[in-house]
Structure formats: structure tokens, C-alpha cells
Image (cartoon, helix red, strand yellow):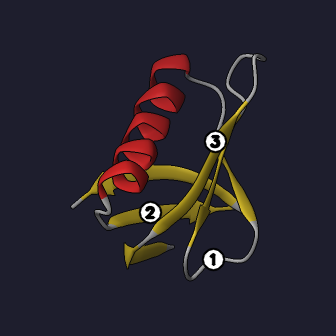
Amino acid sequence: MWHNNQTVTHTYTTVNAQNCYAIVNGLSGWKRVKTGNTDGVTNCFVALCAARANGRPVDVYVVNDMIERVTLR
């Protein structure tokens, strides 16, 4: 399900591969970026961090409590 025009309040990652999380207003708790494709995880996390750093909204697509897609507005 798409959640449009949301604000990213926190981002978090660890040294382990593909371990990225974000808190997005309108969604409950930390949401993990869906794993399985290294470039996809990196690209989503970069977009989430850019939104957080620059105060820009995002559209996020969430399936099974994981962020699958991110559009930076």
C-alpha cells in the first residue's frame, strides 16, 4: 500500500548487509527496507536519508510491514 506525502523522522542502519530502517510519519514504528537486492536497499535508504536531511516528503510503498519502494518528492 502506498503512503503518500509522508515525513521521515529517523533513519538507522547497521554494519550488517541490507540492514536499513526508517520511521515514517503515518506508519507505526520502525519499518525495515525490504532486503533481497543490495542496490535496491541502498537506493531506498539514500532516498529516505535525503528526505530526512532536507525536510522533503516521500511516498513509500509498504508490503508485509517492510518498505519496498520510495519516491522522494
How many numbered discs?
3
Which label number is shown at residue 60? 2
Q: Which of the pair 43/25 is nearer the observer?
A: 25
Where 65 falls versus 6 (above or below)?
A: above
Q: In the image, 19: left or right of 44?
A: right
Give the residue number, with chain letter if any, for mark 3. 34
Q: Residues within 10 Å of mark 3 (few under 14, many from 20)?
A: many
Residue under circle 1? 27
Residue at image x 44%, y 62%?
A: 60
- CA–CA distance in space, label 1 to label 3: 16 Å
Point 51% across, 73% down: residue: 1
Name the spot of residue 50 as percent of width and height, x first.
35, 44
Residue 13: image quadrant is top right
**Which residue is painted at 63% across and 77% down in the image?**
27
Residue type indicated by callout 3: Lys
Whether tag 1 and tag 2 are in contact, CB under 8 A, the answer is: yes
The reply to whether residue 29 is in sight is: yes
Q: What is the spatial separation of the Cα atoms under label 3 and label 2, in whole angstroms?
A: 12 Å
Mark yes or no: residue 33 visible: no
Residue 7 is situated, as x and y percent measured from the top left of the image, at: 43, 71
17 or 53: nearer the eye? 53
- Looking at marks 1 and 3 on the same chain, the residue that comes earlier in the sequence is marked by 1
Task: List x then y, in percent, for residue 41.
Answer: 53, 31
| Residue 66: % across, % down | 67, 55
Label 2 CA crowd tier, 10 Å (few <14, some 14–19, many 20+): many
Q: Which of marks 1 and 3 is in front?
A: 1
| Residue that lies at the very extreme toward the left in this rendered image | 73
Q: Where 14 falls versus 60 (above or below)?
A: above
